[in-house]
Image: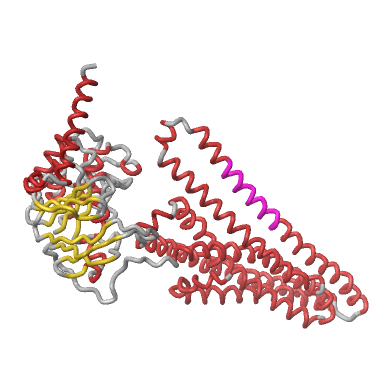
Amino acid sequence: MRSLRTLLPYFRPYRLGIAVGLMLVILSNLFTVAAPYVLKMAIDALEQELRPELILRYAAVLAAISLVAGVTRYWMRKLLNGLSRRMEADIRSALFAHILRLPPQFFDTWRTGDLVSRATNDVQAVRMVAGPAIMYAVNTAAVASLALGLMIWIDPLLTLWAMIPMAVLPPAVVLFGRQIHARFEKIQAQFSEISNFAQENLAGARIVKAYVREDAQARRFEALNRDYKALNLGLARVWGLFHPSLMFFTGVGAVVVLWFGGGQVVRGAISLGDFVAFSFYLTLLMWPMIALGWVTNLFQRGAASMGRLNKLFEIVPEIRDPETPIPLTSSRGAVEFDDVSFRYPGSERDVLRHISFRIEPGQTVAIVGATASGKSTLAALIPRLYDVTEGTIGLDGVDIRQFELGALRDSIAFVPQEPFLFSMRLRTNIELRPGGDEPGAPVSEELRSALGVSQLAKTLAVLPDGIDTRLGERGINLSGGQKQRATLARAVHRDAPVLILDDALSAVDSETETAILGALRDYMAGRTSIIVSHRVSAVRTADLILVLDDGQLVERGVHEDLIAADGTYARLLRRQLVAEELESIERRRVASG
């Protein structure tokens, strides 16, 4: 239950409404316990004198009490359940914002389905604690204390006899609560497995179909679902035993009251009205005992779910804003690596080792090298997707770790190696405007320019709704080259002083690549541009070419000088030319039949 302490900050904005709601809970119970006492007075009065107007008077009082109790119960539910819904939204928003701040390595180890399960099922279970569980816990405490107090007032000895069978309930609640908590944790973990499996198979539906794995994956899902069902049935058995146990012992208490209380009435120790009121109070006391089990169940489920959420909230982003950031209003685009080394978290091998170079404002610099030489890693260090292990990276002469993350990344337009598009309209994917997914808006000059540079304008003619075409998940209705051009258009539209292209044209055909590079040369004038590419054709005209090999900077210079040096760069070019020639021969062979 300690995990629920982290829920307290979410109560603070609504403490006034919660206080009013809890006051209404107590007030409604005051009227509830008043009804049996009025009934006692009516019975005792009617025993003395049976008059119709007396019956009507007490009936009117009971009706008024019931009406007020009903109104207060309505408002207590409206307030407390409504506020719990707001808290649910707050927790889910906080969780999503926290996840977005986490570094890339977090998403390398946590599965999407697990995160979705925690943001839905677990948050819902926590909401049940914040609203219904607390409301009924206070309701239970109020009814129990008021009803028990009045029972003692009517007959202390009879109350003692009635409470003996119920003494078993507290240890039973503790025992069953532990079982419920442990089983619910397993249920939520299994639901995460199901969510993740479903998400992966829906996202990879084409692979499943291509390899004819539909039946195998369906059987695997059935097995996961079967385990989930078994865990829920196990919890249902515990819960099913819990509820009747409470009913049994409260029922025994009712039998005791009937036996001893009836004897008290016969002997004249208490009046008939006292006996009737006592019986009503015992009935009222039975509901808290029964509700105690339900409330315990909700608290245990909520504690298990809050514990799962806390595991996410407790992850501290390693990459975060400095305590006293240096303002970055506008950047010239001067980038400098000073003896930079980097290794991925958990690894003992340096991916980059002692990298040093400087890029002047407005320069176009290319980074080339064999596969796994560290090119993409180097590019990812500049916007602080990762932080360096050793050395420093400077922007305009300042360590990038001294800037606010938002300001730093606002000054950089980054096109990753793997393009990602959202399930929104193509226009919205490029402009990335909050809530801007409405079709039919005019094409701005900035958007028109981005479409032209990326050579995406030609593609619009074949799309059903042009720039307003709604894309499928991850842009599945576009080809690989079209996705890359869309993400390039997004970067161009951002109009940042630093542009990083991480092998952004690998899926584009050579003719389109030539056109894009020509348009980019004009666009990149005056901007610092860093082009990571495995194609030498994309880097020939760069102001500076950096050659990486096994994480080290082995060559630097312009194209002609590097060819003349006949080193790593020249060997890469020769291999690429041979590969392109073989591809050309293969295409001609296929074309000729």
Quadrant holding the C terminus:
top left
Taking the magenta stretch, the answer to whether it contains residue 231 is yes
Point out the stretch of residues depicted in magenta.
223-239
Which residue sits furthest front? 566
Q: Is residue 120 left or right of residue 517?
A: right
Q: Position of residue 31 (x, y in %)?
A: 65, 75
Q: Is residue 540 left or right of residue 98?
A: left
Say which of 44 and 401 sits in front: 401
Q: Residue at x 14, y 49 (%)?
A: 444
Q: Is residue 162 above or below residue 413?
A: below
Q: Residue at x 61, y 76 (%)?
A: 26
Q: Residue at x 47, y 53 (%)?
A: 114
Which residue sits furthest top? 593
Q: Is residue 322 left or right of residue 222?
A: left
Q: Position of residue 176 (x, y in %)?
A: 69, 63
Q: Position of residue 252 (x, y in %)?
A: 83, 66
Taking the magenta stretch, the answer to whether it contains residue 428 is no
Q: Is residue 31 visible?
A: no
Quadrant holding the N terminus:
bottom right
Q: Is residue 455 left or right of residue 191?
A: left
Q: Position of residue 351 (x, y in %)?
A: 30, 56
Q: Is residue 478 visible?
A: yes
Say which of 508 and 23 sits in front: 508
